[in-house]
Amino acid sequence: MENMGDWEQNNHLINELTQGRELARQLQFNLNVPYSSHETREILVQKIISSYEKALSILNFSSGTSVGEPQPAGLGIESPPLSGSPRSEDSDRDLTEQDGSKKRKTFPRWTKRVRVSPGAGLEGPLDDGFSWRKYGQKDILGAKHPRGYYRCTHRNVQGCLATKQVQRSDEDPTIFEITYRGRHTCAQASKMVASSSAPLENQEPIINSNIEPQQHNYQPLQITHPQQQQQEALLNLREGLTIVTEDLDVHQQSLASFHFPPAISNTNTESHVISSSMVNNNFTGNFSHSFISPATSGTNYFSTSSSGMNSFQGNLNFRSSDQSELNEIVSAATSSATNSPTVGSLDFPFGNAEFDPNFTFDSSLFSSFQRFGK
DNA sequence: TACATTTGACCGCT
DNA sequence: AGCGGTCAAATGTA
């Protein structure tokens, strides 16, 4: 388990570093645009600092101990929401109909918390770029708010089995816990990744991607599946700027059945709030898509382009059965980043600290990080 | 007309 | 038996 824990930490570290890089890029971009406000830049700076402090925390607490990341009230890492008991393996399963009978199929699962600013006049979780169709709603025992059940709109057409559950937090109504299950296999998912070939107008400037996965704040506090994490990371990058979320993974899979020690410093708080200013300022000015998506249920308040993943870099060598798929995703994303006219010219402030395409998690990562972290 | 949402019923699991 | 999750008919919307 220790190895698995280290591995998850590495993933987390990668996410932090990637986030920091993207934030820095965003900042650089903002420094070059006349309409960028000081506030916007300030926010980016703070996020960059926070991101790197998280990364440092990860390095400092990489012993695999179950470090609880200090979380603001209501934003802690999770523990299974409300149920009071750990999610059973069964809970990770999804019902699929095959052979005329209902069969349970296990899917990777990860949870994130998304906070939306009340002042922004937005309610509910943001759109993660996918098209979701609500298929149910249930009052959950002990929860003040009902839980919404969504599945990919393309489920029937393309057989995409991705689903998500949206649960408004009891403590803080502005926080939504979104649990994703399964990966998108629909064309929409592919489009998201292969954004590099998309017309510029359909691309979100990297600026938009500062945090979240499938994903917002794209640091999964706990990681389930590598590919999952990557998908989340990609999504985070895409959605990041708009919202901040917390990626919680309470699921333990065979490939990553370990607990990732949550970050430690108080700056690790993964809760980011979309302020009105962010919604109205230049950040959003770079968004070509509305924040409120009427097309999706009320739970999708932030509609973002599905091609904003062009900031993700780093072809992680996941030891996963789906590695090829992951690599495909990452490669596409990497390609996007490289080819993006918006992002391509932006260099990482700390140098070309790109992850080696064949990067594997080992001590070298830590030493390299420590080098530019000091 | 097509698609999305609502909502009570149903099912599987614990 | 109770709960969470899903189905599917009814209803709403563009």
Image (cartoon, coloured by chain):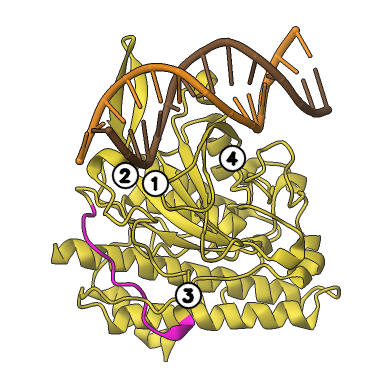
Chain colours: A yellow, B orange, C brown
Horizontal relation, residue A147 to residue A182: left or right? right
Judge left or right: residue A138 versus residue A41: left
Quadrant where the C terminus of chain A sits is bottom left
Report if the CB atoms under discs 3 and 1 are less than 8 Å apart.
no
First reached walking from the N terminus: tag 3 or tag 1: 3
Q: Which residue is mark 3?
A: A73
Amino acid type assigned to the residue bearing label 2 in the image: Gln
Label 4 vs label 1: CA separation? 21 Å
* Residue A105, percent from left and from top: 29, 30
Disc 4: CA contacts within 10 A as few (<14), some (14-19) or many (>=20): many
- The magenta span reads A256-267
Of label 3 and label 2, which has the lower sequence position?
3
Task: Return the chain for callout 1.
Answer: A
Residue A271 belongs to the span the image colors magenta: no
Residue matched to label 4? A130
| Residue in view at x 75 percent, y 67 percent | A119
Q: Main secondary structure of the magenta part?
A: loop
